[in-house]
Amino acid sequence: DVKVTQSSRYLVKRTGEKVFLECVQDMDHENMFWYRQDPGLGLRLIYFSYDVKMKEKGDIPEGYSVSREKKERFSLILESASTNQTSMYLCASSSRGADPGQPQHFGDGTRLSIL
Amino acid sequence: AQSVSQHNHHVILSEAASLELGCNYSYGGTVNLFWYVQYPGQHLQLLLKYFSGDPLVKGIKGFEAEFIKSKFSFNLRKPSVQWSDTAEYFCAVKSTNTGKLIFGQGTTLQVKP
């Protein structure tokens, strides 16, 4: 069974801090994703990566950056946290296999509060 | 721009009632379609998916969905809901061009025992 592990379930930080959210998957998946989940807005894609050291902007990349130094790990970085980044952050991974319907597998999420 | 719209934001049903959650998308090309479910305190899980073939797809826990290409719709159904179906449901569309998933706003389903 695929396991996507996010380092923290809950995190509280202050405005202006640099924040790191870590995600690790154990299925050798090529693709990894970071979303934020807000009530009434669903999931919105922040960044994604198709391979090590590769990254692509999603729909709402402003204020965020990512790092993928190893295949199994995908980090989301808030360069200078702001209160409007208070949200639930979800990491996901998927295989690049031949099946076009490859689903994404999600972690439990990190609920981040910026004070 | 691609978008996904879920018609119902909050649905309340009694046990044994039938369920239909609407999902429409805007994209003219080939798409793969998904329904994900998030039970309270748990991670998102795949409920079912469509990418080709029979437009009526069956998923886990008695759920099914029908892809109607002419209506750009992929509605989720279940004939008889249970209290354990209380969860948030997300429709998602994946463009075969970009590979990105676009999610709808989500529908919160509350089933009363």
Image (tube, coloured by chain):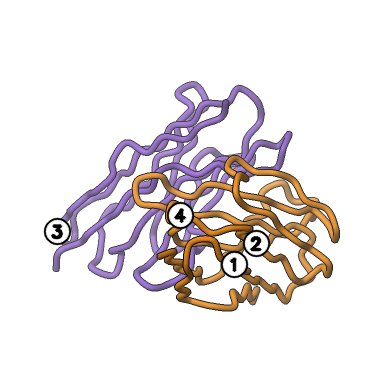
Mark closer to the observer (4, 3)? 4
What kind of element bears circle 2?
strand
**Does the residue at mark 1 contact the one at mark 2 (Cβ under 8 Å)?**
yes
Q: Who comes first in sequence, dot 4 or dot 2?
A: 4
Q: Mark 2 is on which residue type?
A: Ile
Q: Which of the pair A99/A107 is nearer the observer?
A: A107
**Colour in which chain B is drawn:** purple
Name the residue that disc number 1 marks: A19
What kind of element bears circle 1?
strand
> Which mark, residue A77?
2
Residue B71 position, x and y percent, is: 45, 23
> Which mark, residue A37?
4
Residue A31 position, x and y percent, is: 74, 57
The verdict on a common chain for dots 1 and 4 is yes
- The reply, left or right, for residue B63 in relation to residue B2 is left
Residue B6 position, x and y percent, is: 37, 38
Q: Who comes first in sequence, dot 1 or dot 2?
A: 1
How far, Cα to Cα, is label 2 from label 3? 43 Å
Subunit under mark 3:
B
* Up-down relation of residue A57 to residue A75 (above or below): above
What kind of element bears circle 4?
strand
**Colour in which chain A is drawn:** orange
Name the residue that disc number 3 marks: B14
Mark closer to the observer (1, 4)? 1
- The reply, left or right, for residue A50 in relation to residue A16 is right
Q: Mark 4 is on which residue type?
A: Gln
Q: Which of the pair B63/A18 is nearer the observer?
A: A18
Q: Mark 4: few, some, or many residues within 10 Å (few <14, many ≥20)? A: some
* Up-down relation of residue A93 to residue B33 (above or below): below
Q: Mark 1 is on which residue type?
A: Val
